[in-house]
Amino acid sequence: MTRSAQWLYGWLLLLPAAVLLALFTHYPAVATLWHSFRSTPRGSRASTFVGVDNYAQLVDDPIFWQSLTNNLWFAIGTIPLSITLALLMAVWVNGRIAGRGFLRLAYFTPTVLPMIAVANIWLFFYTPEYGLLEQITGAFGMPAHNWLGSKNSALAALMVVTVWKEAGFFMIFYLAALQQMSPQLAEAAAIEGASRAYFFRRVTLPLLMPTTLFVLVNAVINAFRLVDHVVVMTRGGPDNATELLLYYIYEIGFRFWDSAYAAALTMVLLLLLGVVALLQFWFLERKVHYQ
């Protein structure tokens, strides 16, 4: 087979995936960017080019800034905790302990549950006076509390649900990475007299950095694309305390039917995620050691 034939054969193999990627990823992104510079069509009034008016409206929108702030706090509260718990669970179930298979199943089960089902389960936990959490706190003499109806606790309650669901998912990647490590490393460290904590800090963690980078990128994306739990549990309330950015885009686009402004918000979200991803690769890539 000639070099040209190999080149053509390779591109033909890539063509189906490339077409799907272009149709369902690249084209929607470009179309969204174009619509963000136009007005929303209303009845007989066609869409017109408005330049950066949608972005100017975004700057003066207090709910946008609150949703962005809520989302940043949500990411700060869920990402480190989810990854830390995932790593600890993976290390634990990777060891030779009784009931290891049952523990792996228990940790991974929340991951396979539908998002709507998870939200409804936790709605039962958070129900004022009758929910499971209220029953537990009431047994210790604590006063009743509306966890989802209070501005001080609603966002934290959503964070708990997210950590509960995502930690088991991230655990699978860490567990797979731990099982790929050679047991001779631990044996050599034990012969040299290295403690388990020292071995974990100086050997295990560096070898897990490729997995950590992958998990971190996914955790950031998940933190900014959460909408299911908000729809079922709080609908952005109380008083926009749980108004996350993607849910605000959903409201603007499908509740108020302002597709142009929703497109501008979407481009801001894409830009934010792109910048965060670049920073992650920029700072963490130098610490990643591939075997």
Image: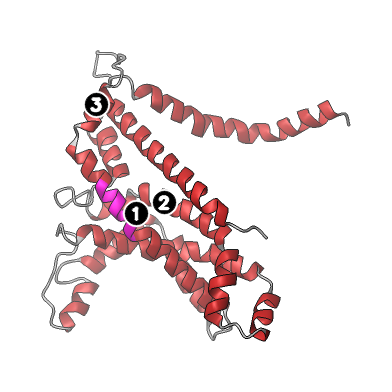
According to the picture, the residue beneath numbered tag 1 turns out to be 75
Q: Which mark is residue 220?
A: 2
**Of the pair 253 and 272, the residue shown nearer to us:** 272
Label the magenta part by its dominant secondary structure.
Answer: helix
**Span of residues in magenta:** 69-77
Which residue type does callout 1 highlight? Answer: Ala
Q: Quadrant of residue 196?
A: bottom right
**Was residue 74 drawn as part of the magenta stretch in this picture?**
yes
Name which residue lies at 39% across and 22% down.
34
Where residue 49 appears, x then y in whole percent?
A: 31, 14
Element assignment for label 1: helix
Which residue type does callout 2 highlight? Answer: Val
| Residues at marks 1 and 3, CA–CA distance in whole angstroms | 26 Å
- Return the disc, 2 or 3, that comes first in the chain's sequence: 3
Q: Quadrant of residue 247?
A: top left
**Was residue 38 drawn as part of the magenta stretch in this picture?**
no
- Are the residues tagged 2 and 3 within 8 Å (C-beta)? no
Where residue 205 appears, x then y in whole percent?
A: 55, 67
Element assignment for label 2: helix
